[in-house]
Image (cartoon, rainbow, N blue to C red):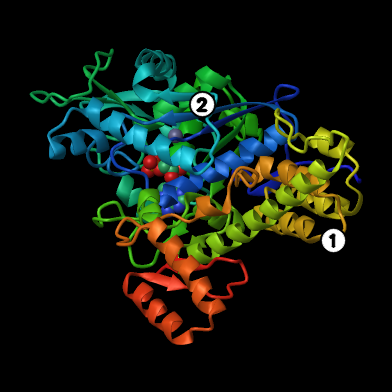
């Protein structure tokens, strides 16, 4: 086996691939901007966490001790990413006539359910913004004298006080500037609120006392504070969706520079993190991803229509995280089929392995290792004919997490002939430790999910299919046709001779 190439990641700050060199030897510290829990996440939001999960798994796989933080934004995110509009949670609570805390709890749980369904590993900590208000006030006090000014509506950050403001976003567009400049008295259009003081005569459900009056923190402040407090500046990698590259992260960076008294961004570490990574968007042309569109594309909607959630993870892995990915039901169906093929191949390997075990008097080696695979173990194993596929896999990952090529390497490993099934299963375990498709745990039947509105039970279908086999044995083609029509009327499509051995699907 050749050595794995060095891990290179695309740093949005410098717009180039850079080698990953940890700040603390042997460790990787990663902060991922979490969800704003005022509504259910849509599947586009979940793409951001599948990406962060693959990054985290890759770092663990490469042997780094990973500390991954994902925050939960339960205060401060306005309906516009800049300082316009209302707090998203305050607005939802008012519309739904519920307490903000109940709203946050409900949608945090829904988010975590989606995280589990997508096999996204739990971070070291879910940091909840409202648990860090005192730290946010301390941070703001420290940067205030040199970098902030107060207006009636709150404390503002003067972006002209730090070098290279906006470098991450590259171009501050006129449209962007126009959108931002909504508060009278701001010194620069891009200045942003650190603390939003509650207007006189109003109360908010969430507000705290501060030196700048009763109010609530700005959204950008939260992430600076939690990242710095939990990981220490500078940490290794900060992630988020590509929209965060434009406003949220440039503002976080400016605050971090102010806090650490750092200079310009030619030294990326002055930004608070050495590497800033952004996933591109999942797009859907008809607008079904907009949370204001009624029934929007949530993971639960996909499951309700009979798609296993890991088919969506597969769909994400098929594209590079920096490419835009277009959602379509056909695309999701194709991803499910690909997952089914892999699961079937692994099931066959497991059966073959079990046969060999029962026929042998010796205790064969187990193929799954509890601790999860690391690159070191992979390098230390003798892969024989599978070695080229493993090498391709590690090269793909090292090249800015190219999961789409990594998936083909896994498929190639599965198709190599005359290899001990235990060894192939080890290769699957080693690769799936990063891809996270759960290939060794899934059974073919797990992938068949009943759509919510299906009118026929699984038992009924199973007995109908068994009866079909009897009819075929009797060569009773007329009855076979009739039965197919009856099943079709109940929403079941019979798939005689399906190469995957998938005998039916719900139409
Ligand atoms: P939010 O809850 O709005 O703060 O978003 C949570 C995460 O989802 C952030 O990292 C966003 O950048 C990301 N995100 C939002 N929309 C999409 C999308 N359509 N595709 C991929 N990521 C997205
Ligand atoms: Zn953030």
Q: Residue at x 91, y 42 (%)?
A: 382
Which one is in front, 419 or 89?
A: 419
The percent position of residue 129, horizontal first and vertical second, equals 37, 24
205 horizontally vs 155: left or right: left
Upstream in sequence: badge 2 or badge 1: 2
Q: Residue furthest bottom?
A: 478
Quarter in which the N terminus is drawn: top right
The percent position of residue 284, horizontal first and vertical second, equals 40, 63
Q: Residue furthest left?
A: 201
Cβ–Cβ below 8 Å for labels 2 and 1?
A: no
Q: Secondary structure at mark 1?
A: loop
Give the residue at mark 2. Answer: 256
Q: How many marks?
A: 2
Label 1 Cα crowd, 10 Å radius (few <14 / some 14-19 / many 20+): few
Which one is in front, 160 or 332?
A: 332
407 horizontally vs 116: left or right: right
Where in the image, quadrant-wise, is ligand 2 located? top left
Tell me which corner region of the image, top left, top right, bottom left or bottom right, holds residue 88.
Answer: top left
Rounded to the nearest angstrom, the CA distance separating label 2 from label 1 is 54 Å
Q: Closer to us: mark 2 or mark 1?
A: 1
409 horizontally vs 459: left or right: right
Can the viewer see residue 187 in this picture?
A: no
Q: Residue furthest front?
A: 474
Q: Residue at x 32, y 75 (%)?
A: 489
Which one is in front, 349 or 89?
A: 349
Give the residue at mark 1. Answer: 417
Label 2 Cα crowd, 10 Å radius (few <14 / some 14-19 / many 20+): many
């Amino acid at each position: 086996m050749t050595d794995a190439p060095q891990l290179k990641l695309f740093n949005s700050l410098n717009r180039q691939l850079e080698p990953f060199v940890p700040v603390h030897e042997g460790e990787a510290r990663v902060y991922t901007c979490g969800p704003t829990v005022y509504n259910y996440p849509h599947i586009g939001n979940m793409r951001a966490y599948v990406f962060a999960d693959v990054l985290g798994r890759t770092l663990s796989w490469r042997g780094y001790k990973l500390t991954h933080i994902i925050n939960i934004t339960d205060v401060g995110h306005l309906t516009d990413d800049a300082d316009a509009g209302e707090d998203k949670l305050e607005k939802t609570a008012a519309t739904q006539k519920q307490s903000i805390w109940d709203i946050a709890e409900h949608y945090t749980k829904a988010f975590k359910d989606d995280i589990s369904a997508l096999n996204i590993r739990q971070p070291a900590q879910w940091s909840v913004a409202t648990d860090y208000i005192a730290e946010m006030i301390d941070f703001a006090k420290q940067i205030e004298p040199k970098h902030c000014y107060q207006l009636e509506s709150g404390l503002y950050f003067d972006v002209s006080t730090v070098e290279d403001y906006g470098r991450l976003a590259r171009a501050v567009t006129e449209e962007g500037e126009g959108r931002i400049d909504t508060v009278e008295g701001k010194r620069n259009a891009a200045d942003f609120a650190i603390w939003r003081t509650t207007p006189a005569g109003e109360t908010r459900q969430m507000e705290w006392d501060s030196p700048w009056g009763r109010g609530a923190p700005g959204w950008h402040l939260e992430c600076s504070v939690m990242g710095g407090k939990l990981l220490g500046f500078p940490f290794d990698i900060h992630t988020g969706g590509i929209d965060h590259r434009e406003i949220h992260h440039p503002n976080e960076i400016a605050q971090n520079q102010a806090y650490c008294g750092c200079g310009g961004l030619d030294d990326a570490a002055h930004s608070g993190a050495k590497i800033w990574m952004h996933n591109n968007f999942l797009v859907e042309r008809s607008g079904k991803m907009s949370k204001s569109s009624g029934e929007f594309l949530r993971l639960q909607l996909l499951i309700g229509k009979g798609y296993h959630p890991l088919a969506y993870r597969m769909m994400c892995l098929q594209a590079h995280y920096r490419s835009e990915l277009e959602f379509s039901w056909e695309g999701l169906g194709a991803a499910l089929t690909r997952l089914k093929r892999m699961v079937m191949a692994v099931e066959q390997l497991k059966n073959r392995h079990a046969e060999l075990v029962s026929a042998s008097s010796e205790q064969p080696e187990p193929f799954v290792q509890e601790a999860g695979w690391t690159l070191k173990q992979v390098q230390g194993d003798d892969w024989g004919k599978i070695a080229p596929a493993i090498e391709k896999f590690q090269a793909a990952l090292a090249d800015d997490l190219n999961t789409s090529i990594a998936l083909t390497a896994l498929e190639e490993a599965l198709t190599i002939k005359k290899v001990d099934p235990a060894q192939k299963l080890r290769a699957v375990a080693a690769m799936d430790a990063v891809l996270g498709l759960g290939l060794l745990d899934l059974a073919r039947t797990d992938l068949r999910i009943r759509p919510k509105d299906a009118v026929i039970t699984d038992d009924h279908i199973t007995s109908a299919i068994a009866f079909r086999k009897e009819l075929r044995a009797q060569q009773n083609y007329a009855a076979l046709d009739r039965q197919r029509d009856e099943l079709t009327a109940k929403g079941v499509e019979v798939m005689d001779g399906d190469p995957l051995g998938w005998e039916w699907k719900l139409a």
